[in-house]
Amino acid sequence: MKRQPLEALGLTPEQIGAVLNMYHADMDKARAEHFRTHKATETRAAIARMLPCLHSFKSLRTVLDAVNSAYLDERR
């Protein structure tokens, strides 16, 4: 949201500030919710893609050890 359209409506600088503050607060909430929802969807999709691989191992410990090792190698 821009100041100019609000000025064109005849709002005072204080009113414009209040409107912009409310707008940005609402946008921050919407962005946070979108990120949370998108991240959850992305995580579920990644897990779903990994399920066939997970079932091929005899134990979850083997999978976790392999993932942990790959993670540590990547960080080096």
Image (cartoon, rainbow, N blue to C red):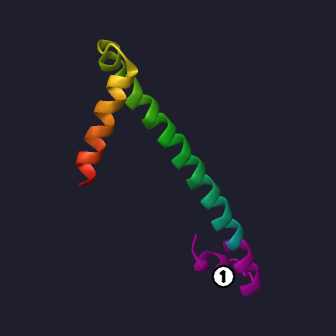
* Foreground pick, 36 / 2: 36
The crowding category of the residue bearing disc 1, from other C-alpha atoms within 10 Å (few below 14, some 14 to 19, many at least 20), is few
Location of residue 40 in the rendering, given as x and y in whole percent from the top left corner: 51, 37
* Foreground pick, 71 / 19: 71
Tell me the residue at 32%/16% (across/down).
52
In the rendered image of this protein, does residue 54 appear above or below residue 36? Answer: above
Image quarter of the N terminus? bottom right
Location of residue 2 in the rendering, given as x and y in whole percent from the top left corner: 57, 75
* Foreground pick, 14 / 37: 37
Q: Is 52 left or right of 73, judged from the image as shown? A: right
Query: Can residue 1 be spotted in the picture?
Result: yes
Image quarter of the C terminus? bottom left
Q: Is the magenta stretch mostly helix, strand or loop?
A: helix
Location of residue 22 in the rendering, given as x and y in whole percent from the top left corner: 71, 67
Q: Is 67 left or right of 8, judged from the image as shown? A: left
Q: Does the magenta stretch include residue 17?
A: yes
Task: Examine the image and state in which quarter residue 43 appears.
Answer: top left
Q: Does the magenta stretch include residue 6?
A: yes
Q: Is 67 left or right of 14, judged from the image as shown? A: left
Q: What stretch is highlighted in magenta?
A: 1-20
| Helix, strand or loop for disc 1 | helix
Tell me the residue at 38%/24% (across/down).
61
Location of residue 29 in the rendering, given as x and y in whole percent from the top left corner: 64, 56
In the picture of the structure, the residue carrying the numbered disc 1 is 7
Query: Mark 1: which amino acid?
Result: Glu
